[in-house]
Amino acid sequence: ELPATELAVPFQTVAVKDGVVYVATAGYFTVAGGEVRWGNSFLWAFDAANGSLLFKAPYATSIWDPYFLAPTVAGGKVFLNGGTLRLTTFAFDALTGEQRWAREVRDGVATFVTPAINADDVFNANAGAVSLLDAATGELKGSAPVVANMEGSTVYASAPVISDTGSVLALSGSGYQETINSPVMGYGTKRSLNRFTTFPLGRTWSTAPLYD
């Protein structure tokens, strides 16, 4: 059981691989005067058979991270998005929890986003772009903008999908969004679906803003 007095995990989901359950949590703590600060965040791994804790690995995050979406497990690693004022992707050893690498990708908090993985690459969609990282080293291999009307926005609830043809599909925008041009947050903003080639990384088409 996770220590609920120290953790904030609304809407969080888990990933399961080879008998291990992985979940990422965003924590908080209080300082003198009762002020609440965010941090104390961890990737947890549990034995799926008996619930015993296998490891607890710290990572950097902010007040909104990581809500809603699960870590991604592939190739002996667990990939997780976090960061404070910049989207950062973390890679952990799936057995020991040792952090293998961390890479700042671009401006924009990592709210409601999770990476997609193929054999060699990590894809992220956030803050107006899709980014491509080397899964082994975290090296940034490329970045491509999404539709222009979403530049400067924080993209929520965005998990890229790698198709069987090798292309990547990703949403831009959100039904819950704050942009640099409109600081009022609220539901109802329409999103576009975007298709990207992977080598080289580039956008090939985008739909009109249709999706909630």
Image (tube, rainbow, N blue to C red):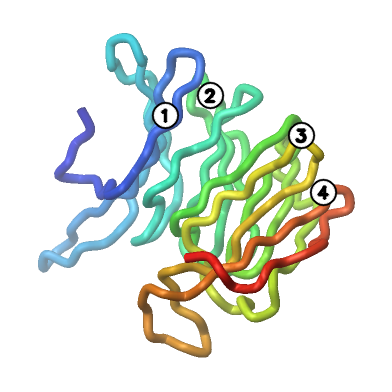
Q: Residues within 10 Å of mark 2 (few under 14, many from 20)?
A: many
**Which callout, 4 or 2, points at the residue further toward the start of the chain?**
2
Q: Position of residue 106 (x, y in %)?
A: 63, 64
Q: Which residue is mark 1?
A: 22
Q: Which residue is mark 4?
A: 198
User: Which residue type carries mark 1?
Assistant: Tyr
**Which callout, 3 or 2, points at the residue further toward the start of the chain?**
2
Q: Residues within 10 Å of mark 4 (few under 14, many from 20)?
A: some
Image quadrant holding the N terminus, namely: top left
Question: In the image, which is nearer the foreground, mark 3 or mark 4?
Answer: 4
Q: CA distance from mark 2 to mark 1?
A: 9 Å
Residue 128: quarter of image:
bottom right
Q: Position of residue 180 (x, y in %)?
A: 52, 85
| 40 lies above or below 22 | below
Q: Which mark is residue 11?
A: none
Q: CA distance from mark 1 to mark 3?
A: 21 Å
Identify the element where label 4 is drawn.
strand
**Which callout, 2 or 1, points at the residue further toward the start of the chain?**
1
Identified at 17% across, 67% down, the residue is: 35
Q: Which mark is residue 120?
A: 3
Identified at 67% across, 48% down, the residue is: 123
